[in-house]
């Protein structure tokens, strides 16, 4: 497959695309980003890298981190994590409290905010030094020691935390948070503030496509476990647009409001895109189009 | 892959499984079925057939028919069908009116009852003799001329139609039903009453696994179109348990309250199971377990 | 109290009021009404009548009829009616299906559409000739033999019945409709189509203010029973604006989308207003203002 | 009216009443109360006092305080308070977040928790020393200098604050809290912890029945303003049982999970009851029955 040529075609096609999306304003620190940034990076299962555009510029991965925290929690607790969070699509917005009230504090899945906060609580319980240890994990799976939190972004999320604080307190009222609410939120805001390039993102998710093994051969999860998390990304990875992404792109993946998306074709490739303008559902508008173009041009979808 | 041996192992394993599910009572005519029936039929992409148990006994396919009506509507109207129905998981029960009220009469997807009724309305508009023509289509894709409606079951659904009549009238009040409500419901109750064996069911869904072509080579949909419908079955095929099925089985599929499930691995196989006892979410309890065992034993999931 | 002078002042004040409301469009037959019609009629407990404006012109009482059907059902079944319908404000729109789904087919109160349909079903069971008998009842309590159904309006409601048909079928699916859905709806559409003048309306509701006795002394309900229905009108009589009406006017009452409102001060007076322009909540805009002015000028509210 | 005799009869009748309710467990500090306590105190508009049972024992007024904070806020801000909170019954539980999400952070009324927290925020803005000043207000309207906060109860609420903290943060995320969340909650928990006897409670609410004037003649609100707050208590004072209370008792009032209820007949009397066992809706079981008996025996309801 001539990935280099295909990525160039996609980049060319997107020049004509009338992007009407908007950069997120929910986190003030992210609102100042250049909206015209665009990058793609694809890594094949044989570790060949193809990058284009701003693919080596760092950006805030935000909710993409939720797939990495759930992987780490899964490595500690295995199927026990599903006692406190579900595996079903939510049918409501990523930060909704409605479902949580009807379903007594059990979030529908670990990729909506409430679910990710429960996973963060699990990690705060499992890890000796949660923030340090999680960063170590990220650097290990990505093979990139320069990855770090953006403390200004984390602080900005903390300053405007009220919706997430409502979710965390609501979960706690149902008994589904073990630790102190502020401590859990502090970990959560930091995990979301992690910055990576498209390349680092593709490398971080390499183990999901490679039967659980990182690029340099470390076994993070079993083959069966990554299949299950890939399935979960497929049904729940794009908030209330997961069905649309599955329908159009046909690959498991995860998006973030920083404008990043990562998707993977098991045993074939991992691909990461970055473009800050978001559609109404909170997903990167150009990123969605780029990935739809990729599977259309290559015919490579899991279906 | 030694499918015959694997199916035997699965059947053996299920003997020890403490099935606690219950046969559906929502349609009186179906309530009298022998709850201990069990069959599996697997057809490989090379048209080799493997059947076991009651795999050649007819049963009511019920909601499985929704995947076939959407395929037929898709062949007529292509992407236009999404103007009137969405592609997102619902997050609510298969017969819920709540989502419909919040989202102004646009059903979340074609596999919940409201969405299937909208699709039925499209077919009533597209087909000259809706019931006859749909049956002809089913016989054509399955290659089985003996497939028919069960008129007693259709009548039984009509006699207890009130929830579906509420949905259809509600849709009509939002302008999302073109034809007479009773005519649309009559078509809908008949499509659900179709009876097939596991073998016929596997053959009917063969084109989903075979890039749009039936066993005898008729092109029903394009390769891209079946990929999209497979994606839709993956995210929405099992009501409010779609995430669970995707997580555990990792194949696109569709279930019905008659106890049938069909699933497929693109370009590899189609498999149909039948066991009438349903779990709390309305899916066949043993069928779910059989398919989980199948992908666990073979390692064959799309993820 | 100089009611004549007060009504004149109110009429004068309303001339300056910038009415922005709109005549209902949900029933085509009602959409052609002259939007500038306005009338008030007040009857004191001593049967002295005060009318002004178009108070002797007939209009469609619509949902105001719900207070009269519940009174008749109450006279037959007493407290048993609350087994099938509640006495709580709904917190949702008058034609919502959401609450009904969460609360398993028990409408919150008899003044939202679903509740009124259940009451209609009770009357269809209790009355030998439902439509004839109900009309006889209305003529009796009002003392006006000229009151009748408007059959064109009833037919118009039937032609656009889909939302109400959804409600009735939904109720039936929960077992909360005893009779045939179409028969119940036919009765319901007729009850809503009744036409009265403001004067006839005030006279019809006289027994609510007069400890259960009509103007000519017939005991319709006990003193305790009318107190309870007055209480119910207070909390639920104005759809999702009941709190606002209670807050501003402070009298029990009932409104209809034909633009009528009737309110009463127990043991003192009954007042009916008519102005077809509705506010966003579906209540007569000028009628609400007229009644607020009435209680402000007279100081006569129950609180 | 022979109130002394009537209260005795009521107390006698209640001896036979099979109280099955339960003392609240949501606030640990309140869970230890003697469940068999029972008192009534009635004060006539002429300031004659009738007490019976444990009517001079202090108890936690809890949500009854919401009527007093809204009165104080109303005295400062008049109709402006309705820009941030509504006057409609909620149709959902007192601590629900669902309505708040659908209605963008505007609580339905000031008597559900979210609404009361918004009112608390207004008072934190209006008062120089919120807790001290509110206590001064309470002592002034009641004429009882011994009324105080129960600091252990306030601390107990703070320790189990998560549901209320979720509400307050959710409100803040919609911009409907001006002050620091913790400061607002601290005020709110203290207002709820106030302890009074039935007598003090009846005296505190005297101005609601007396056209805005306290027992010793201080004008707290205008005649029109108290009418409006009485109307609000009528439609919203008993959480999701307001319709039931209005239907059975027919007087405006307010309840608290400490087991207290206060109700009033404008220009006639104020009555307070206390019995800690709560029904399923969170209102005092015996208190509700006592007040129903009172209006049945005296015929004194506003309807």
Image: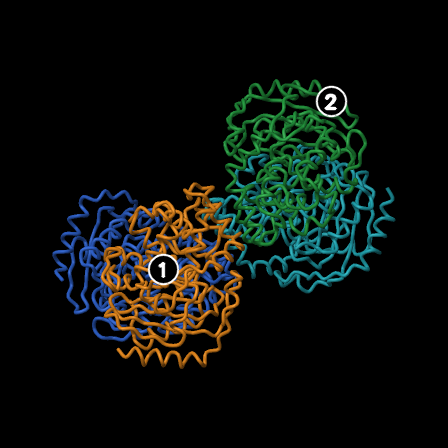
Chain colours: A orange, B blue, C cyan, D green
Q: Which residue is mark 2?
A: D49
Left or right of D107? Residue B241 is: left
Q: Quadrant of the C terminus of chain B?
A: bottom left
**Image quadrant in which the N terminus of chain B is located:** bottom left
Task: Work out whether residue D177 can be spotted.
Answer: yes
Give left or right: position of A68 versus C152. Answer: left
To which chain does the residue with label 2 belong?
D
Q: Nearer the viewer, residue C98 or C260?
A: C98
- Does residue C88 appear left or right of residue A17 in this picture? right
A59 vs D228, nearest the viewer? A59
Give whichever of A251, A4 is nearer the camera. A4
* Residue A75 x/y as whole percent: 29, 51
The percent coordinates of residue C257 (x first, y second) are 66, 55
In terms of secondary structure, where does tag 2 sit?
Answer: strand
Query: In this rendering, do the residues under marks 1 and 2 share a single chain?
Result: no
Question: Is residue B71 placed above or below C249 in the rendered structure?
Answer: below
Q: Contact, CB < 8 Å: mark 1 with mark 2? A: no
Q: Is residue B77 visible?
A: no
> Exactly how many numbered labels are in the figure?
2
Check the image and report above or below for B300 versus C221.
Answer: below
Residue wearing tag 1: A235
Under circle 1, the secondary element is helix
Badge 1: chain ID: A
Q: What crowding class fits label 2: few (fewer than 14 Cα within 10 Å), some (14-19), or many (20 or more)?
A: some
The correct choice, above or below, for C181 with respect to C252 in the image is below
Q: Position of residue B111 (x, y in %)?
A: 37, 60
Crowd class of label 1 (few under 14; some 14 to 19; many from 20; radius 10 Å): many
> Residue at 38% of width from left, 70% of height from top?
A273
In the rendering, at what x and y percent does residue D230 appear? 71, 39
* CA distance for labels 1 and 2: 67 Å
**Which label number is shown at residue D84?**
none
Point 21% across, 71% down: residue = B215
């Amino acid at each position: 497959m001539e990935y280099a040529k295909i990525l160039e075609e996609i980049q060319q096609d997107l020049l004509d695309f009338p992007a009407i999306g908007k950069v997120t304003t929910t986190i003030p620190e992210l609102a100042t980003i250049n909206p015209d940034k665009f990058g793609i990076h694809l890594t094949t299962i044989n570790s060949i890298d193809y990058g284009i555009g701003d693919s080596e510029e760092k950006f805030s991965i935000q909710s993409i981190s939720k797939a990495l925290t759930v992987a780490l929690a899964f490595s500690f607790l295995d199927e026990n994590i599903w006692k406190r969070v579900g595996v079903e699509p939510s049918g409501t917005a990523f930060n909704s409290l409605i479902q949580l009230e009807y379903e007594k504090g059990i979030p529908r899945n670990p990729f909506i905010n409430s679910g990710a906060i429960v996973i963060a609580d699990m990690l705060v319980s499992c890890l000796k030094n949660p923030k340090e240890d999680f960063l170590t994990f990220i650097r290990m799976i990505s093979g990139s020691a320069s990855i770090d939190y953006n403390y200004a972004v984390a602080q900005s999320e903390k300053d405007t935390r009220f919706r997430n604080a409502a979710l965390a307190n609501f979960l706690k009222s149902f008994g589904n948070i073990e630790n102190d609410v502020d401590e859990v939120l502090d970990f959560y805001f930091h995990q979301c503030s992690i910055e990576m390039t498209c390349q680092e993102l593709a490398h971080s998710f390499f183990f999901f496509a490679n039967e659980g093994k990182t690029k340099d051969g470390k076994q993070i999860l079993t083959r069966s476990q990554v299949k299950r998390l890939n399935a979960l990304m497929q049904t729940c990875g794009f908030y209330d647009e997961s069905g649309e992404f599955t329908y159009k792109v046909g690959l498991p993946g995860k998006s973030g409001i920083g404008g990043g998306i990562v998707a993977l074709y098991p045993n074939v490739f991992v691909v990461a895109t970055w473009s800050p303008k978001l559609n109404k559902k909170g997903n990167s508008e150009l990123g969605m189009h780029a990935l739809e173009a990729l599977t259309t041009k290559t015919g490579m979808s899991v279906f």
